[in-house]
Image (spheres, rainbow, N blue to C red):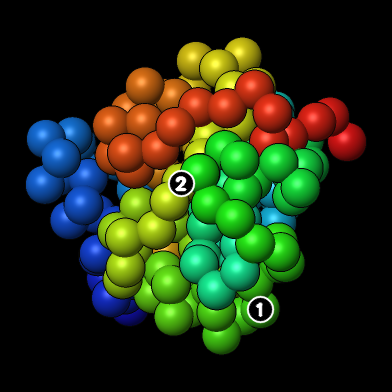
Amino acid sequence: MSNLSKAPVKKVRKALTDAGMNDTVIELADTARTAEDAAKSTGAELGAIVKSLVFLVGEQPVMALVSGDHVCKMENLPRAVNLEGEVSKANAADVKAATGFSIGGCAPIAHSKDIPIVIDVSLKRFDVLYAAAGHHLCVFPVTVTELKKLTGGIVSYNIAEPI
């Protein structure tokens, strides 16, 4: 059975077509579980990989879409999404509950719940990005403009810095 037929991937594919985009999900031969793996598997630069990172601001899940060659500045998330509270990394159960996806294949779209999303401005350096598509062997190409449209996220200059 192809990974493109798995339920989480089908959810991403449907979200793409529902948004009027083409179903461009790609099944890879090698894993895209980490940004480094995804860069190797797609042949893209590390910075063109979208890391879908989930944090908790207090009890509220928040997703930061960060370039593969950057790290999230967690302390800036509350202000970016207009929330208050302590920031912590979400654990695997929190990620699954908020998004419906497992870590390693967590897509930036088609979440179980509406959560605030912030997009790292440094992703604009690339014409084509690759984001997880619900499984560690599946990704989809996307632009920053499309990512913004698909997620409703806000682009921020302050949520990430180079590794």
Mark 1: which amino acid? Asn
| Quarter containing the N terminus | bottom left
- Closer to the N terminus: mark 2 or mark 1? 1
Residue 147, by quadrant, is: top left
Residue 64, percent from left and from top: 58, 47
Residue 67, percent from left and from top: 66, 35
- Identify the residue at horizontal 64%, vertical 46% (top origin): 77
- Identify the residue at horizontal 52%, vertical 57% (top origin): 62
- Identify the residue at horizontal 18%, vertical 34% (top origin): 21
Mark 2: which amino acid? Ile
Looking at the image, the residue that sits furthest to the bottom is 93
- Identify the residue at horizontal 65%, vertical 62% (top origin): 85
Residue 135, can we see it? no
Task: Describe residue 8's horizontal placement relative to residue 41 as left or right.
Answer: left
**Residue with the mark numbered 1:** 91
Q: Is residue 136 above or below residue 141?
A: below
